[in-house]
Image (cartoon, rainbow, N blue to C red):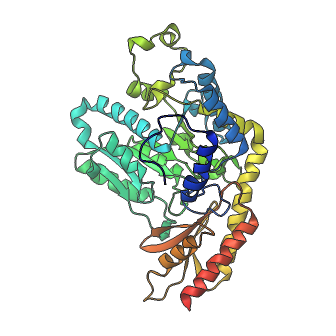
Amino acid sequence: MLPESAPYCPEPLQDILEDVSNCIIPGLTHWQSPNFFAYFHANASTAGFLGEMLCSGFNVVGFNWISSPAATELESIVLDWMGKMLKLPSSFLFSGTGGGVLHGSTCEAVVCVLAAARDKALKELGGWENITKLVVYASDQTHFTFQKAAKLVGIPPSNSRLIETSFSTGFSLSPENLRFVIEDDIKSGLVPLFLCATIGTTPSGAVDPIAELGKVAMEFKLWLHIDAVYAGSGCICPELRHYLDGVELANSISMNPHKWFLTNMDCCCLWIKEPKLLVDSLSTDPEILRNNASKSKAVVDYKDWQIALSRRFRALKLWVVIRRYGLANLMYHIRSDIAMAKRFEALVGEDERFEIVVARKFALVCFRLKPKVEEEDLNCKLVEAINSSGRAFVSHAVLSGIYVIRCAIGTTLTQQHHVDALWKLIQDKAQSLLM
C-alpha cells in the first residue's frame, strides 16, 4: 500500500494523515481499546500524553546533570515520590541511602543490576575468568526477559536455574526448592550470584514470598532483585502493600508505571540500595563529558545508571501523571480494575462449563473451558474464536501443562459493561464449540 522508496519532495500533512487512517490504523492492534484483555495492558492517559508531549517538545538529552540539571533533579524527586507511595525503605531512596532511575523497560533494568552484581562478584573472586562459575536463579514463571538479560551480561545459559513451580504453591517460588538448588550448585563448585523474585508473574499473577526468599538470598550472599513490573503499581494501595513485605532484604526493585499506572510508554522505575555498585559497573568518563559538577560527586549523572548514553526526559511524564491524578485517584484506578476482575472471576465461577485455574490476586483472571479428555485443544480454539471476532482480545498461558485463558483487566477505558460483554462473547463462542 506504501511506495517502495522515500519521497524526494515534501508531502502535505493531510496526505500523510490519510495514509495513517487507510494504511496504518487497520493494521494496528488497539492496545488502548476497552476490549483489550491480552498480555498486560499498556495504560495511557491524557496526563501521560501531555507529559510525553512536553518531553518530545523539549527534546533534552539529560545524560549527565550539567546537560539538563532540571531533568536529572526531577527524576530523582519523582523516584522518591514513587518509592514513598510504595512505602519502600529509605535505603532505596535518595532521601535515604539509595536511589532510583527511570529506564525504558525492566529488561534494561535487569541487565543493569545483573551487570552490577556480576562485577561485584568477579572482583571478589579475582577476575573475569570466573564468570562461568556464576549462577542466576528464578522460577519457571519469571518473565523470559530475565534469561535474555543473563545472557547479555555473559552468564552461560547452562547457569540459569528456572526452578519449577506448581499448583501447590500457587506458582510462587518455593524457598525450600531454591535452597536445595543453591546447595547443589555450591557442591558442584559454582557460585550463586543473583535471584529474581516476582510480584505478579505474567502467566498467572503469582507472587513470590519475598521475605522468605530474602532470607535465603542473604544466607548465600545472592543479589536479590524484585520484579514488580505489573503488580508493583497495585502496591500503592494499603490492602495490597503486604505483597512487598520483605522488600528491605532486596538489593534492587523495579516496576513499570507504563503498565498499570496511567503513564504512557515507556517508563520503568528501578530502585537500588547501593547506587555506587551500578555506577562502578556502568560508568564512563570520556574527556568530552568531564565537568566540575560531575567531578565534585555532588550530582547524579544518569548515564552511569543505564546502558545507553542518551536518555529521554521520562520523569516529566510520570511527574505530570502523579500531579494530575494524585494518590487518591491512582488508588481508585487500581481498585476499580480489581473490582471488575473480581466480577469477571465470579461470572466464570457461576458457569459450570468453566473453571478458575489459579486464584486471582490482582486484576488477572486465569480460567478455562473444562475440556473432555478428547478435546485437549478446546481452549486454544476458544481463544482463536474470541480474538478472530474482532470484538475482544485475550491471551493464554500454560500452567503445569494446562492451557489457560488469561483475562487481564486494566486498560484505561475499560468499564464494567465491557467486561460483561467479554463474558457474553466467551459464553457464545464456547457454546458454538461445544455444539
Q: Residue furthest front?
A: 9
User: In the rendering, at what x and y percent does residue 346 appear?
Assistant: 69, 74
Seen at 39% across and 11% down, the residue is 287
Closer to us: 312 or 297: 312
Name which residue lies at 77% across and 39% down. 324
User: On the image, which quarter does residue 119 sit in?
Assistant: top left
Residue closer to the observer: 162 or 111: 111
Can residue 299 be seen here? The reply is no
Compared with 55, 289 (above or below) is above
Q: Is residue 122 visible?
A: yes
Percent position (x, y) of residue 22? 58, 55
Q: Compared to 345, does 150 lie above or below?
A: above
Q: Position of residue 248 (x, y in %)?
A: 55, 40
Q: Nearer the viewer, residue 396 or 114?
A: 396
Residue 266 appears in which quarter of the rendering?
top right
What is the residue that sits farthest to the top in this orientation?
292
Q: Is residue 287 left or right of residue 198?
A: left
User: How many marks can you see?
Assistant: 0
Is 327 rendered above or below residue 434? above
Image point (71%, 50%), residue name: 237
Q: Quadrant of the C terminus?
A: bottom right
Q: Can you give x and y, in whole percent of width and height, for residue 196 in the image?
A: 44, 48
